[in-house]
Image (cartoon, helix red, strand yellow):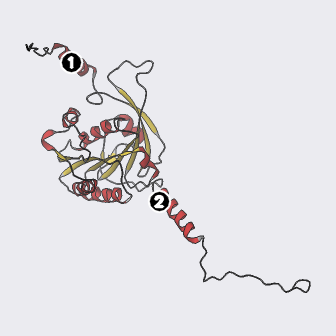
């Protein structure tokens, strides 16, 4: 009672849930999922696979990629350089044997170009599923197979469950999984052992003399046991990286010495 006027004190019952609690839980869950992509994961023991690109192996990955790992290559659009660097790593992964499985749901994979990068034709298997659901299933099954050295696939969209299943499957199979995804995927959680963003740079620049090369910037977005945020610039040569000067000159010589195609005039 205040000044003779009775006052009623409102109390909140512990039995009545607040209307804000569901919204708070959603925010906390969203933050937890985002933090999964930023928290360093435990370092995987065992041999490490070197990509053959010194800047990536030494400056970004501390010696290479552990076997039994899933690697995500992110790019703004197709043709940005992620495909070439992923093929380079696929070639290194199958050097000691094992099958190479290409899961090509979009039907855009061109085998002759991939073979120029060093993929063994006799051990390369091309799978073209009818749907993305079948493509996810094929990638999961092949990653878990111990006879498969590397699986390469591109997905314009993936839910949060599929990459987690891919990582568990490749840990079982012991090979390497290479998944090409759009750059927008970096906003989601990362279950892969390594996530890289590939950015093409203007070429040539002042001082550059190799007109047949392309310059790329590789960003480390996530990696087990490593702090993300570093980036390196690399040169990607056609058809391999690195390409010695002698071999480059030999290829130019062979191209110049090749006979011109026979042309026959057809009279109409």
Label 1 CA crowd tier, 10 Å (few <14, some 14–19, many 20+): few
Quarter containing the N terminus: bottom right
Q: Measuring 46% from the left and 50% from the top, which residue is drawn there?
A: 187
From this view, report whether residue 267 is shown above or below residue 168.
Answer: above
Mark whose residue sits in front, 1 or 2: 2
From this view, report whether residue 7 is shown above or below residue 205.
Answer: below
Q: Secondary structure at mark 2?
A: helix
Q: Secondary structure at mark 1?
A: helix
Q: Nearer the viewer, residue 169 or 56?
A: 169
Left or right, 111 with reference to 237: left
Q: Looking at the rendered structure, which numbered label has been put on residue 250?
A: 1
Residue 152 screen position, x and y as percent: 26, 46
The residue under label 2 is 33
Residue 21 screen position, x and y as percent: 58, 71
Q: Measuring 36% from the left and 42% from the top, which residue is drawn there?
A: 63
From this view, report whether residue 116 is shown above or below residue 45.
Answer: above
Q: Nearer the viewer, residue 202 or 196?
A: 202
Left or right, 86 with reference to 6: left
Q: Quadrant of residue 214?
A: top left
Q: Looking at the rendered structure, which numbered label has been put on residue 133?
A: none
Left or right, 262 with reference to 251: left
Quarter containing the C terminus: top left
Label 2 CA crowd tier, 10 Å (few <14, some 14–19, many 20+): some
Q: CA distance from mark 1 to mark 2?
A: 52 Å
């Amino acid at each position: 009672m205040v000044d003779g006027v009775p006052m009623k004190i409102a109390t909140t019952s512990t039995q009545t849930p607040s209307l804000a609690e569901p919204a708070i839980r959603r925010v906390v869950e969203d933050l937890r999922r985002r933090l999964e992509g930023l928290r360093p994961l435990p370092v995987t023991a065992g041999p490490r696979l070197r990509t053959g690109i010194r800047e990536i192996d030494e400056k970004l990955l501390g010696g290479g990629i552990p076997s039994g790992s899933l690697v995500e290559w992110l790019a703004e659009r197709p043709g940005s350089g992620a495909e070439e660097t992923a093929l380079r790593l696929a070639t290194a992964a199958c050097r000691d044997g094992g099958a190479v499985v290409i899961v090509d749901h979009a039907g855009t994979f061109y085998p002759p170009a991939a073979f120029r990068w060093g993929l063994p034709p006799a051990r390369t298997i091309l799978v073209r599923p009818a749907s993305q659901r079948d493509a996810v299933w094929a990638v999961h099954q092949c990653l878990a197979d111990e006879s498969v050295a590397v699986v390469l696939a591109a997905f314009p969209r993936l839910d949060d469950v599929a990459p987690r299943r891919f990582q568990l499957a490749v840990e079982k199979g012991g090979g390497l999984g290479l998944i090409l995804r759009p750059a927008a995927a970096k906003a989601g959680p990362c279950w892969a052992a390594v996530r890289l963003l590939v950015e093409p740079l203007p070429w040539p620049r002042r001082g550059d003399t190799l007109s047949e090369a392309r310059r790329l910037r590789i960003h480390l977005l996530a990696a087990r046991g490593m702090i993300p945020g570093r980036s390196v610039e690399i040169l990607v040569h056609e058809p391999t990286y690195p390409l010695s000067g002698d071999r480059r000159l030999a290829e130019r010589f062979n191209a110049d010495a090749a006979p011109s195609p026979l042309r026959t005039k057809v009279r109409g």
